[in-house]
Structure formats: C-alpha cells, structure tokens
Image (cartoon, grey):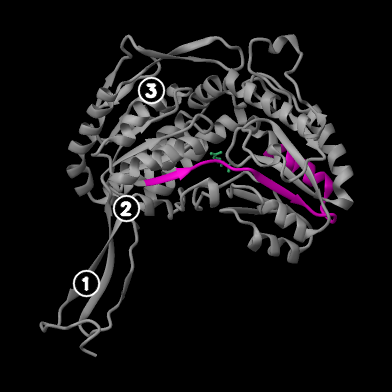
Amino acid sequence: MSYARNLIGGSWEEPGPAVIETVDPATGEKLGKAPKSTAADMARAVAAAKDALPSWSSRPAPRRAETILRLAQLLEQRKETIARIVTREMGKVREEALGDVQEAIDMAYLMAGEGRRLYGVTTPSELPNKLCMTLREPVGVCGLVTPWNFPVAIPSWKSLPALVAGNTVVLKPSEETPGCATAFVEALVEAGIPPGVVNLVHGTGEEAGAALVAHPDVAAVSFTGSGETGRRIQAIAAPMLKRTHLELGGKNGVVVLDDADLDFAVRAILWSAYGTSGQRCTAASRVIAQAGIHDKLVERLAEGAKRLRIGNGWTPGVQVGPLVRPWAVEKVEKYVKIGLDEGAKLVAGGRRPSDPSLKGGFFYEPTVFAGAAPTMRIAQEEIFGPVTAVIRVRDLDEAIRVHNGTPFGLSGAIITRDLASAMKAARAFQTGIVYVHNGTIGAEVHLPFGGIKGTGNGHREAGVTGIDFFTEVKTVYIDYSGALQRAQIDR
Ligand code: UN1
C-alpha cells in the first residue's frame, strides 16, 4: 500500500502509473510515491463532493461537529507518528513538527465547539411584531489548495471550518507533502466523515490544482501559497464570480527600539527568522533596529545565527532543519547574491554548510545581512528561507515607515519596554497580525490569521472569523404582525 493515496467518494485509490516521487530533504533519499492526478480525477472528486453535499449540509451542525471532535482525539493519539511524516517530507525539526500537528488538534477542538455556535445575529426590526436575524448556510463544494510548510495545520485550518459549516471539500495538498495530507484525511475517515464529504486528490498545481479551481461546481477556493499562483487563481475564478481566499506570504519585520531587552530581542528574532528554516509566511525576514541598539544587535544576531545547530530535523538538539527541496536552496542562493550585489553586508551564513554529515540534504546556513537599505530586493521580496536583513533607523516614526514599506502585510512585531511606542506601532503597522514583545511568528488558531496588501484578498482564516469565508449569510425577516408592514414607509 502506498503511503499517499487519493480519496474519492469514500474510496482510497492507489497511485496509477503517473506518480510524484517525494524525497527526504535531510538526506535527498527517495521516500515514496503519490498519485499525479489528472483533471479527470479531479472531476470525479468534485462530483463526489457535490453528491455528498445535500446530506452533509442537512445534518445538524452539532452532529457534524461530533466527527470533528473524534478527529481531534485521533490526531492526539497519532501526534508523534504524524509529526514523523512531517519531518520526513518537509524537514522541519521535531518540536515544530509536533507543533504543526498540535495546531491541527487545536483547530479540531475549536471547530468541534463551533458546531454548537455558528452564530448569526438577531436584532430588532424598525417595525413592531417583526423579528430579524441572520443564518449561516454552507457555500457548497470547497476547493482547498494547501502548501508544504504547514502540511497538517493548514489543511486543518481550511477543511474543518468548511466542514462544520456544512460544506463538502476537495483537498489538493502540496505535491511535496502528500503523506501528511493522507495521514490527516485517514484520521478524518476514521473519525466517521461520510463518503464524498472529504476528498483528497494529489498532484501538481498546474494539472490537479488548476482543474479544481476552474471546475464550475466548486463554489469557493481557499489557497495558501505564492503570490504568483494566487493571482492566477483569482483570475480563473473571477469570471465565474467564484469566492476565493488567498494567503500569499509576507516580508515581516521586527522593530527593535533602543530600550529593548537585547537578550530577549536576539532570542525572539532567531526563533522567528530561522524557525522552520525561515519557511513560514510569517518569518521575520527583516529586522528594523534603532540606531542605539543596532550595532550590538547585529553582532549578537550574527553570533546567535552561527551557533544554531543545523541537521536532520528529527535529531534531538537540532534547531534548523533542511529546506524543502533543492530549488528552495537555489532561491536562497540567488537572493544572497542579489543582497551582496546590492551592497548589503553578510555577517553570518551565506552558504551551504560544509559539514560532510549533511551532504545530500538541502541545507543552508542561517544568514544575516547587515547594512540593508529598505528598498533593496532582499528587504522587499519574500525569500522563504533562513535569511534576515537588518535595517538601521533613527526613531520609531522611521521604523514604522520602513516597516510598512513593502508590498506585503502579514505579520509585524515590535520589541520595546515602552507601552506608548508599542501601542503606536500596533496601530500603525499595515499588517493583519501584530506582535508586541515577540517575533513575527506564533499565531494561535482561535484568532483570525491573514494579511493586507499583497498578502491576500481581504479574508481571514482560523478563528471564528474563518467561518465567514465558508458560509453564505442569509438574512431572515419574520413578520408576525399579520398586517402588511412596509419598511421605511410605515413609520
Ligand atoms: C504559515 O507560515 O503559512 O504563526 C503559517 C505561525 C504559525 C502559522 C504559520 N502558527 O507562524
């Protein structure tokens, strides 16, 4: 039996002749095969999801939520096993792989509870003997296209709110992490999700993903990934007036003011720049340091980055795992060269590690650039690797201007002891998420996640707000006066 299979209409399907092969990024060794599905496979999955819609959506939400509660319990039991697959497929270190599964468990508990809420509003009418309220209806078949960097958490962020709200789904996970998605969907099946309600179709974005987005029976598409793909999805969906949720990365900055606790700032930045080897939409790829603390901070960051232990993510004590694939390392190398050509100063990293025991893996040293100008490409473009660029600023106002001066707007952070400066930044940052006295990562599932500007198209996922994307709001007026009451006229 293959470790990655499609699930269509309740049946597991082994890969056919066309497959995608996965590799362990820590060693470069082959892991296994996943189906390289076609548009026809996708059409079968969408048809199954469409067939399953009437009975799933008419099941009361508290009953739908019972399945999600069982999923939470199963994921808890399997946390370590699934985390092992996460590290194998995409390289993140053990602690973070466990965190990835924990994020799905958290989301499952949150959505299990949401089954008994799914609140609308009730509000007075302008007329007597009349009641006004809103109800939530499912949108229909939802297409979910998910990335490899949170290969269990993000499928849960998208599928569980969709399911509790009564939708059926087709999940097209990243081709780098098909085993993680399979393990997640296996748990959903064992939790009792009925056939066709959740379908899993592996494959490439160009073939399987594009077929899902373009399918006329798919009412909504939720996507996390690159800006380029997000824009293509939006363009395909627009003429069909299809609802899209896009989560497209960031260029997140940590502002460090002169009065900050230096030791703390260094720890927070190292964690948010090099956690997951910088492969998070929320990674701190810019440090915006006030002049008085700047030199000490650069020195300490460079020291700290050099001390981080690189290696196989499952080895105890390793802090920085490999990048996902050779193309990811090449992209980082390209940006390091761009940074040097632009005149930034490399103070740590900037190369693949020389340690022979890491040969074969897709490793890159944690890298710090100093002397970056806000307009440099390394300070503007998403690198999605272990690279951060330090920019010197005079004061808080300049820090805020620099912070906001990129095309993205996902996460921003400020480290200071001064409450007024922190509050000013929290209000002024053009981001969907702000951290005070922390780095740029660490979102919790019960709060909205998402960004503004080039990061997305205005929706939020996770939290109770995440339900909004997956529901149509229906306004219901109940007039029990027995008379014809005309709004705006009969006053
Ligand atoms: C992402 O990088 O796409 O806040 C998600 C965080 C994680 C989620 C990141 N909880 O960094």
The N terminus, quarter of image: top left
Label 1: few (<14), some (14–19) or many (≥20) C-alpha neighbours in 10 Å:
few
Residue 55 painted magenta: no
Residue 65 on image: x %, y %:
32, 46
The answer to whether residue 217 is left or right of residue 278 is left
Q: Which residue is mark 2?
A: 471
Of badges 1 and 3, nearer the viewer stands 3
In what quadrant does ligand 1 lie? top right
What's under tag 1, amino acid-wise?
Answer: Tyr
Residue at 27 percent of width and 50 percent of height: 138
Label 2: few (<14), some (14–19) or many (≥20) C-alpha neighbours in 10 Å:
many
Is 346 above or below relative to 445? Answer: above
Residue 221 on image: x %, y %:
36, 41
431 vs 467, nearest the viewer? 431
Disc 1 secondary structure class: strand
Q: Which residue is mark 1?
A: 477
Residue at 59 percent of width and 47 percent of height: 408
Give whichever of discs 2 and 1 has the lower sequence position: 2
Residue 264 painted magenta: yes
Disc 2 secondary structure class: strand
The span picked out in magenta is: 244-272
What's under tag 3, amino acid-wise?
Answer: Gly
Of badges 2 and 3, nearer the viewer stands 3
Q: Which residue is mark 3?
A: 203
